[in-house]
Image (cartoon, grey):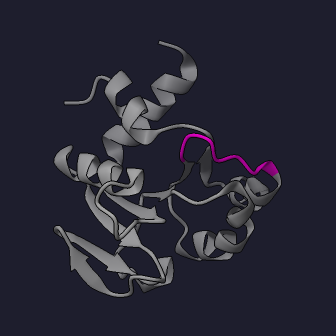
Amino acid sequence: MDNELIEIEEVLRTAKTIAVLGFSNNPNKTSRQIAAYLIHKGYKVFGVNPNIGRKNIDGTEVYSSLLDIEESIDIVDIFRHSEDIPAIIPDVLAVNPKVLWLQQGIINDIAVKPVSDSGIKVYQDKCIAVYYSLCRIN
């Protein structure tokens, strides 16, 4: 196992709470499927979508903003376009998760630099479910 995978395995083993930013109202969207997968694996998952507002969808508490979540967040998992990342960064810095995770296909090195500079681990262009399945957890 390479060093990055060992590091990710430790992140996923120790994390308890994950905020899925870009959580969709549509159960067929990847963000919903990944959220359900993470719940099944034992994580407490919060959905974040300003267009949905505060409600419970299939057992997931959904919030309008990361800032509305009253618990500490271990991982902020992003399902948004790469060009949308700069607008998200102030809230990520405010909630100070251990990890900012940009899903597969999402990369914005410039936008995430302040996050990594603040000591928050950043992963880009990686599917959290794929990496979970590669790790030896449980």
Placement of the C terminus among the 4 image quadrants: top left
Drawn side of residue 132 relative to residue 118, left or right: left
Residue 101: image x %, image y %?
54, 49
Residue 77 makes an appearance in the image: yes
- Name the residue at 26% across, 29% down: 137
Could you tell me how many numbered marks the image carries?
A: 0
- Name the residue at 60% across, 48% down: 121
Q: Quadrant of residue 136?
A: top left
Residue 16 makes an appearance in the image: no
Drawn side of residue 121 relative to residue 97, left or right: right
- Name the residue at 52% across, 57% down: 79
Residue 134: image x %, image y %?
37, 22
Residue 37: image x %, image y %?
25, 46
Closer-to-camera residue (76/53): 53
Magenta stretch, main secondary structure, is: loop
In reply to whether residue 107 is colored magenta, the answer given is yes
Q: Quadrant of residue 46?
A: bottom left
Q: Which residues are magenta?
A: 103-109
Residue 117: image x %, image y %?
75, 55
- Name the residue at 69% across, 66% down: 84
- Is 132 above or below relative to 49? above
- Is 2 above or below relative to 117? above
Drawn side of residue 6 relative to residue 119, left or right: left
Residue that protrudes farthest toward the right in the picture: 110
In reply to whether residue 80 is colored magenta, the answer given is no
Closer-to-camera residue (113/51): 51
